[in-house]
Image (tube, rainbow, N blue to C red):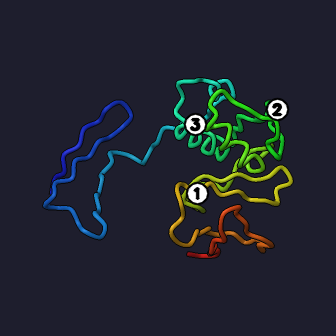
């Protein structure tokens, strides 16, 4: 069956008719004229200066921070943020609270795991021995990390203990 689509710049929008939807997984086959060729996906990078913008929504800023760090662009690299977050402030008091609360995961951290190992963003400490997972919202079940071969010595969160599954999931 032919499924309608349209190209808008470098994005293809596919409209799946309800009569071909599957309740489990809908499969769409896209026939290409030649080998698959993709544009490089731009990285998300928020700057430290952008974090001072008073019109920036706190939730957006938090998501941009975690995504930026996960991709190797830490906006706090050249700031006065310390590992404990003491005496640190931004224009937005809510964002300041979030940053100081999670300063350890933001201070001198680098690019996290590649996509596919964890659903979400992650960061790695400067000594490469602490992996920080940025879990969106309040976790309601186990947190899965695919392909982790390291031995986990501790797994902590300031609020509650989480069940972390590792290995081939």
Numbered label attached to residue 80: 2
**3D distance between C-alphas at marks 3 and 2:** 18 Å
Q: Residue 77 occupies which quadrant of the picture?
A: top right
The CA span between labels 1 and 2 is: 25 Å
Which residue is depicted at the point 64% across and 44% down? 71
Q: Which residue is mark 3?
A: 61
Does label 1 or label 2 sit earlier along the sequence? Answer: 2
Image coordinates of residue 140 in percent, x first then y, are 50, 68
- Viewer-proximal residue, 138 or 5? 138
Question: Which residue occupies 69% across, 28% down?
Answer: 48
Neighbor class of circle 2 (other Cα within 10 Å; few <14, some 14-19, many 20+) is: few
User: Which disc is residue 135 wearing?
Assistant: 1
Q: Residue at x 65, y 25 (%)?
A: 52
Q: Foreground residue, 111 or 97?
A: 97
Residue 137 locus on image (x, y percent):
52, 56
Q: Quadrant of the N terminus?
A: bottom left
Q: Which residue is at the front of the view, 18 or 60?
A: 60
Q: Would you place residue 62 above or below residue 144 in this image?
A: above
Residue 70 percent location from the top left of the image: 65, 47
Residue at 42% in and 48% down: 35
Number of numbered discs overlaid on the protein picture: 3
Question: Image height check: is 133 above or below 66?
Answer: below
The front one of 99 and 66 is 99
């Amino acid at each position: 069956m032919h499924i309608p689509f349209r190209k808008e710049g470098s994005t293809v929008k596919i409209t799946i008719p309800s009569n071909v939807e599957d309740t489990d997984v809908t499969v769409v086959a896209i026939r290409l004229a030649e080998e698959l060729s993709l544009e490089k996906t731009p990285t998300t990078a928020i700057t430290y200066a952008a974090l001072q913008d008073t019109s920036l929504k706190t939730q957006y800023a938090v998501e941009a921070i975690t995504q930026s760090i996960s991709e190797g662009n830490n906006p706090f690299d050249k700031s006065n943020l310390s590992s404990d977050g003491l005496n640190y402030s931004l224009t937005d008091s809510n964002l300041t609270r979030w940053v100081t609360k999670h300063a350890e995961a933001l201070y001198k951290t680098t690019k996290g795991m590649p996509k596919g190992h964890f659903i979400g963003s992650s960061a790695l400490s400067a000594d490469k021995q602490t992996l920080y997972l940025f879990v969106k919202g309040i976790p309601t079940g186990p947190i899965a990390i695919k392909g982790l071969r390291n031995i986990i010595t501790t797994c902590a969160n300031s609020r509650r203990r989480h069940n972390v599954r590792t290995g081939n999931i």
